[in-house]
Image: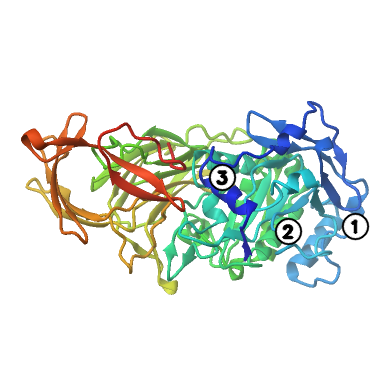
C-alpha cells in the first residue's frame, strides 16, 4: 500500500479538515487563462498542463480539457493475447461496430504507478501525465476530486493514510465531510469512476470503519494492487456499451452510475431482480471473485439509449431532530456528516433510542421520461431495528424509523463487525433498475450505552461511557467521535430530555452532578454552581476529545460535518 507521507500526508489531512491546509502556492493560481486550449492526446498520453487547464472557482476543481487522439480506435480494444470469455465477446462487438470501445477514455493513476493498469491491456486507453506544477502539490496523487477531466475517466489510487491514530483509507477520506463528499459526487456525475482499496478499514480485527456505501466509487477488499481487477472491470464495461448508448450516458453524466449498476447486476450470486434488490448485489467492499465480466459485457451491451436508468437523487424532507448540548453533549458537533444528491450520511450522537427521518427521491428523472417506481432496501443493519415506510403512489418518499444499534455482524463469514446502517434507494423505469442512492447512519462504537425501559415502556438511555475499551470493534474513528474519561448516569425529566447527569471520572473516582438549565449545564449546587459547556476539541495529532469547559463560546471542531 502506498503510504501518504510528507506533503501528501498534509494533503490527506486537508481533505479531512477543509481550510486547514498549509499556506502554499495554489497551482490553480498559475492557471490564469479563461479560455484554455484543449490538448490533443498524442501517443496515448493525456497531458495535464497549465495550457489546457482552467480553475473552476465555483466547484473548487481544476478542469482539464482534452481531445481524443485521432485514429486510436484502430488499435485493439483489449490485449490480443488475452483469451478470457469477455475478451472474445468484446472484440467481436467492437469489430462489428456494436460496442463503443475505449478510444475516448482516459486512465488516471493516482499513486505514482504503484498499482497501475498493465501497459497494453487496453491499448485504446490513454493515460494522464501531469505537469510538474501539479505534481509539486500532489494533485496527481491520493484521493481524486481536485482534477476534472473532459473525457470519461477511470482511475485508482492504491494509497492510504497509514500512520497514527487517524490512519484511514482513501474511501474514508473521500467522504470525510460535506466538501469532500460533494467533490466526490461531482466526479461521479461527470463520468469519472475511481477505485480505492479498503486498506484496514474493512477487516475483522478493526471492523467496518467506512462512512457510507455511497456508489460514487468502488472499494476493493485488501490493500495494494487489489484495486486493479475493478479498474479492468470498469474499462471492460465502458468498452461494451453500444456507441449511441455511451454517447448519451456521457452527455447526461450517467456513465458512472450505469457502470456501477451493470457490475452489481452481474455479480456472482446475483441472478435476478430479487437478488439485485438485496444486500447480495451491494457489498460495501468488493471482492474480485465476485466479478462476472462476460455477463457484464453482455448486460452493458443490452442497454439502449431508450432504456438508460436514471441516477437517483435524494432530498432530506425531515432530519433526525436534535439540539446540540442537550440531546447530546458537544455543542459544536453536528449529526450531519454529509448530504449529497445520491448519498446521505448521519452520525448518531443523540441520547435517543428511537428516531425517524423522511427522505424523498421524487427529484429523480428518467432520461427518457419513463414513469418510475422506487424500491427502498435495507442493505446493512438489524431488520428488527429499522423500519422503512414507503409513501406516495410510486414509493418516491419514505419515512425511516430506526432504533439504536450496537455493533452487529456485517459479514459473518469474515467475523466482521459494523456499526453503520445502510439503506439503498433504487429507481425502476420498467426495463432497468438504477444503481442505488444510499442513506447511511453511523453509530459511536466506542461508547458503552445502557438503555432501560421507562415507566411508559419506551427505551431511555440510563448510562453512557465515553472511553473506548481495548476490545471495541469497530475501532473508534477519532476524527468524528470524541472520547472522554468519564461515565455518565442519566436522569430524565418530564419533557423527555435528560435533566440530571451524575458523572464518574475514570482513574480519580471523582463524582460530579450536572443539571440542565435553559442554555446548557451547571455543575455543583447553590452558590457553588458553575456553568459548563461541553466542546469537542482537536488535540494532537488531530483526534477529537470531549472537554467540559467553563462556559466560554466553543469553536467548531474542524472536519466535522456542519
Distance from Cα at disc 2 to Cα at disc 3: 20 Å
Q: In the drawing, what numbered circle is on residue 14?
A: 3
Coloring basis for residues: rainbow
Disc 1 designates what residue?
75
Judge by depth and name the residue closer to the eye, 391 or 203. 203
Q: Earlier in the sequence, mark 1 or mark 3?
A: 3
The residue carrying pointer 3 sits among few (fewer than 14), some (14 to 19) or many (20 or more) residues within 10 Å by Cα, namely: some
Query: Where does residue 158 sit, x and y in percent of width and height?
Result: 64, 61
Badge 2, how many Cα within 10 Å: few under 14, some, many 20+? some
CA–CA distance in space, label 2 to label 1: 26 Å
Closer to us: 375 or 82: 82
Q: Is residue 484 above or below residue 495?
A: below
Q: Is residue 259 left or right of residue 410?
A: right
Label 3 residue SS: helix
Does residue 107 appear left or right of residue 61 in this picture?
Answer: right
255 or 301: nearer the viewer: 255
Local secondary structure at mark 1: loop
Amino acid at each position: 500500500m502506498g503510504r501518504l507521507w510528507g506533503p501528501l500526508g498534509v494533503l490527506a489531512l486537508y481533505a479531512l479538515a477543509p481550510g486547514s491546509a498549509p499556506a502554499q502556492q495554489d497551482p490553480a493560481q498559475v492557471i490564469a487563462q479563461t479560455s484554455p486550449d484543449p490538448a490533443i492526446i498524442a501517443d496515448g498520453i493525456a497531458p495535464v498542463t497549465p495550457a489546457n487547464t482552467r480553475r473552476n472557482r465555483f466547484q473548487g476543481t481544476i478542469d482539464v480539457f482534452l481531445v481524443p487522439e485521432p485514429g486510436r480506435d484502430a488499435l485493439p480494444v483489449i490485449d490480443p493475447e488475452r483469451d478470457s470469455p469477455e475478451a472474445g465477446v468484446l472484440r467481436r462487438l467492437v469489430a462489428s461496430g456494436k460496442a463503443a470501445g475505449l478510444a475516448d477514455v482516459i486512465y488516471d493513476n493516482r499513486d505514482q504507478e504503484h498499482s497501475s493498469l498493465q501497459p497494453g491491456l487496453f491499448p485504446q486507453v490513454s493515460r494522464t501525465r501531469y505537469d510538474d506544477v501539479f505534481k509539486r502539490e500532489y494533485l496527481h496523487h491520493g484521493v481524486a476530486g481536485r482534477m476534472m477531466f473532459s473525457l470519461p475517466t477511470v482511475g485508482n489510487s492504491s494509497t492510504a493514510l497509514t500512520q497514527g491514530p487517524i490512519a484511514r483509507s482513501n474511501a474514508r477520506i473521500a467522504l470525510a465531510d460535506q466538501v469532500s463528499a460533494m467533490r466526490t459526487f461531482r466526479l461521479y456525475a461527470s463520468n469519472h469512476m475511481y477505485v480505492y482499496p479498503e486498506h484496514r478499514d474493512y477487516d475483522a480485527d478493526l471492523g467496518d470503519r467506512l462512512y457510507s456505501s455511497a456508489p460514487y466509487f468502488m472499494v476493493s477488499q485488501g490493500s495494494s494492487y487489489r484495486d486493479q481487477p475493478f479498474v479492468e472491470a470498469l474499462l471492460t464495461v465502458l468498452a461494451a456499451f453500444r456507441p449511441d448508448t455511451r454517447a448519451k450516458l456521457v452527455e447526461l453524466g450517467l456513465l458512472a452510475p450505469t457502470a456501477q449498476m451493470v457490475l452489481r447486476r452481474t455479480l456472482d450470486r446475483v441472478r435476478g431482480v430479487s437478488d439485485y434488490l438485496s444486500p447480495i448485489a451491494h457489498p460495501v467492499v468488493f471482492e474480485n471473485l465476485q466479478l462476472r465480466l462476460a455477463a457484464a459485457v453482455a448486460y452493458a451491451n443490452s442497454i439502449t439509449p431508450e432504456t438508460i436508468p436514471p441516477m437517483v437523487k435524494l432530498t432530506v424532507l425531515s432530519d433526525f431532530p436534535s439540539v446540540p448540548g442537550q440531546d447530546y453533549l458537544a455543542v459544536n458537533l453536528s449529526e450531519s456528516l454529509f448530504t449529497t444528491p445520491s448519498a446521505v450520511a448521519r452520525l448518531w450522537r443523540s441520547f435517543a433510542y428511537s428516531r425517524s427521518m423522511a427522505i424523498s427521491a421524487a427529484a429523480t428523472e428518467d432520461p427518457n421520461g419513463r414513469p418510475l417506481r422506487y424500491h427502498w432496501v435495507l442493505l446493512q443493519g438489524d431488520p428488527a431495528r429499522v423500519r422503512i415506510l414507503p409513501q406516495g403512489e410510486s414509493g418516491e418518499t419514505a419515512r425511516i424509523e430506526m432504533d439504536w444499534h450496537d455493533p452487529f455482524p456485517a459479514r459473518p463469514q469474515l467475523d466482521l463487525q459494523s456499526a453503520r446502517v445502510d439503506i439503498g434507494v433504487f429507481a425502476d423505469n420498467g426495463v432497468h433498475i438504477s444503481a442505488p442512492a444510499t442513506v447511511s447512519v453511523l453509530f459511536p462504537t466506542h461508547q458503552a450505552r445502557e438503555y432501560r425501559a421507562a415507566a411508559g415502556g419506551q427505551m431511555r438511555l440510563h448510562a453512557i461511557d465515553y472511553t473506548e475499551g481495548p476490545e471495541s470493534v469497530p475501532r473508534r474513528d477519532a476524527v468524528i467521535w470524541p472520547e472522554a474519561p468519564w461515565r455518565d448516569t442519566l436522569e430524565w425529566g418530564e419533557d423527555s430530555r435528560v435533566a440530571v447527569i451524575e458523572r464518574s471520572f475514570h482513574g480519580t473516582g471523582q463524582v460530579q452532578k450536572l443539571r440542565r438549565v435553559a442554555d446548557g449545564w451547571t455543575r455543583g449546587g447553590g452558590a457553588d454552581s458553575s456553568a459548563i459547556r461541553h466542546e469537542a476539541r482537536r488535540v494532537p495529532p488531530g483526534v477529537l476529545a470531549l472537554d467540559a469547559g467553563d462556559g466560554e463560546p466553543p469553536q467548531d471542531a474542524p472536519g466535522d460535518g456542519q
